[in-house]
Image: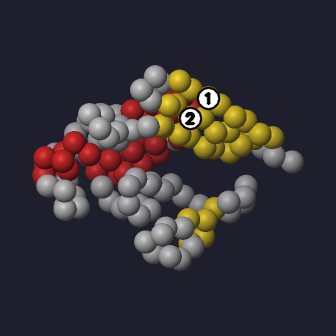
Amino acid sequence: GTPTELWYFSNLELEAQRLAPGLYGLSNHLLDTPWPKVQGLKQALAGQLAQPGWNPSELLDLLGDRQVAPDTALPDTGVGLALERQLSPRFIQLEKYGTRASSLLYLRAQQLTFIERTWPTGTEQTVTLPLS
C-alpha cells in the first residue's frame, strides 16, 4: 500500500484487490471472513476509533481478548467443535498453538507507525516513520 491506497492479496483467491476506505478484518482465512472474533474486533475497533484522541495501546489491547465465542456462532472449518471453541478467541493460547504476536499499523499526522507485541512476554516494539 501507499498513504493513499491499500491492496489485499490472498494465495487462495489469487487476485489482488484494491481496498476502498473502510474498516477490514483479517484472521486465518480470507479478508472479512465473518467469524465472531473478526466481527467483534471490527465493532470494538470502530467504537474506539470513533472516540477523539484514540489511544494506539488501547487499540492493540483489543487483540488480547480471550473470550470464547458461543457454539451457535462458531464456523465449521472442519476441525471439530472442541477445537473451533479453542480457536474462537482473538488471542489464542493453546499448548502447542497460539498467538505469536499482536500488531497495529496506522497512519496519523503524516507518520506511519507499526507496533508489535510479541508473546509470551508481551514485549512491545514501535517503529515510526515520517512520510514526506
Type of amino acid at the residue the image marks with label 2: Glu
Work out whether residue 94 or residue 37 is closer to the camera in this orientation and state it. Answer: 94
Mark 2, secondary structure of its residue? strand
Q: Is residue 47 left or right of residue 125?
A: left
Work out whether residue 42 or residue 30 is closer to the camera in this orientation and state it. Answer: 30
Name the mark on residue 32. Answer: none
Q: Is residue 53 left or right of residue 87?
A: right
Q: Position of residue 30 (x, y in %)?
A: 41, 64
The correct choice, above or below, for 28 with respect to 105 in the image is: below
Q: Tag count in the figure?
A: 2
Type of amino acid at the residue the image marks with label 1: Gln
Name the mark on residue 116. Answer: 2
- Near mark 2 (Cα within 10 A), the count class, few <14, some 14-19 or many ≥20, is some
Q: Residue at x 61, y 65 (%)?
A: 7
Mark 1, secondary structure of its residue? strand
Q: How is the image coloured?
A: secondary structure
